[in-house]
Amino acid sequence: MKMKIKIDDRVTDILKSFKLPDEIGFGTTIAPVMITCDFKEGIWETPKLGPYGPLKLQPTAKIFHYGQEIFEGMKAYRVNKKGPYLFRPLENYKRFNSSAERMAMPFIPEDLFMGTIKALVDKVSPFIPNQSGDSLYIRPFMISTENHLGIAPSKEFKFIVVASPSASYFKKEKPIDVFIERFYVRAVEGGTGQAKTGGNYASGLVSAMKAEKLGYSQTLWLDAERREDCEEMSGMNLFVVKNGKLVTPALTGTILEGITRSSLIRIAKDHNIDVEERSLGLKELIQGVKEGQITEAFACGTAVILKSISSFGEEDGTTYKIKSKESEYTYQGEKVRGQIGIFLKEMLLSLQEGRSKDPYGWRVKVPTSVDSYQKVTKGDNQQVHLDC
Ligand code: COI
């Protein structure tokens, strides 16, 4: 597949003068170049790779009023100077379009999504941190840009990709405490819970504030109808280990279909760890933690990777602390004992970072400019064809 991309003449100099700060944090250091592509009159225009900077939008652009917006979170790795590798980018591409469909936004062709992301990662590749656990966090997103205050799907959109050299999502090493939200809900059946759209995150912020005040770092959302089943956390999926089995809430249409979630399920099954995707009642969770059948819990997602949970807690101050215990599973044909969460994190991360074999074909090498760009014209901007 060949895709045209316009490369702004300033890109080379901008990249030359960019330096990573000593402390990169998560989502605070932003690469100095980005992708933009406009959708007008039913077609995607030629994407541009240019300087990172402010967008020029009218105050009546629909994004500001009706929140027609979607995004993805993905990562590129370059540990020990290998790569860069993307992890299962096609899954992000599919989810992006399924979010677009739910939010009445246009379909984005595969070559545009994959080609622009590969071009950006290639340009930014010298700034991908090479410590294990660090990566280039990539944020493709689409916003509605038509200037009109009527409630109707926008006719114009902008697709943008920015990238952020990032460390772990949580600054602190220690496991997190999770707040059980019994009043507010995140998603309802038939709603947008399954889509990666800003509104799902915005509506959870009131709970995040409550949780933070009480000393928690994430909210656990319950089902909206009965407030009885665990669904997911604000930016991550939930797993527990109960009686040595991995249990995670089944995808019911209200939960985001996490790519890390599905990858962990596959890796666990391939190491003889039983996995149950089913409803996980809040009562079952509390009882399991109190009585010691639940010996581990963790959050997972692209940004967070995998983070242990040490306790769940209520608004009235009651907390249920997990008494962690090791489980038995098979690794390289041998039965071993250990924490399932720690094992799965290492299996996943070593695959993502190119430190282990990839039996699934999940790792996608980003081609370097030498073999992927073919210059075709030169004017104000270079226009190149990109193999993707
Ligand atoms: C991701 O994991 O990529 C997300 O979008 C979640 C957010 C908490 C950063």
Image: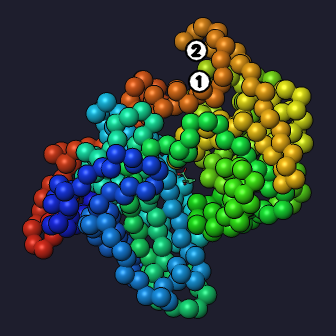
Mark 1: is the Cβ under 8 angstroms from ligand 1? no
Circles 1 and 2 in contact, beta carbons < 8 Å: yes
Q: Residue at x 81, y 23 (%)?
A: 243
Label 1, on which residue? 343
Q: Is residue 21 above or below residue 334?
A: below
Q: Residue at x 43, y 56 (%)?
A: 28
Q: Amino acid at mark 1?
A: Phe
Q: Is residue 226 above or below residue 106?
A: above
Which residue of the protein is positioned furthest toward the left in this rendering? 378
In the rendered view, how is the structure colored?
rainbow
Mark 2 residue crowding within 10 angstroms, few (<14) / some (14–19) / many (20+): few
Q: Which mark is residue 331?
A: 2
List x then y, in percent, for residue 369. Answer: 19, 48
List x then y, in percent, for residue 132. Answer: 42, 33
Q: Quarter of the image holding residue 296?
A: top right
Let me know if residue 361 appears in the view. Answer: no
How far apart marks 1 and 2 lie (CA) works out to 9 Å
Q: Residue at x 59, y 70 (%)?
A: 103
Q: Residue at x 84, y 26 (%)?
A: 293
List x then y, in percent, for residue 267. Answer: 58, 28
| Residue 138 shown left or right of residue 221 in the figure | left
List x then y, in percent, for residue 95. Answer: 54, 55
Let me know if residue 211 appears in the view. Answer: yes
In front of the other: 171 or 96? 171
In front of the other: 156 or 65? 65
Task: Name the element at disc 1.
Answer: helix
Q: Amino acid at mark 2?
A: Tyr
Task: Name the element at disc 2.
Answer: strand
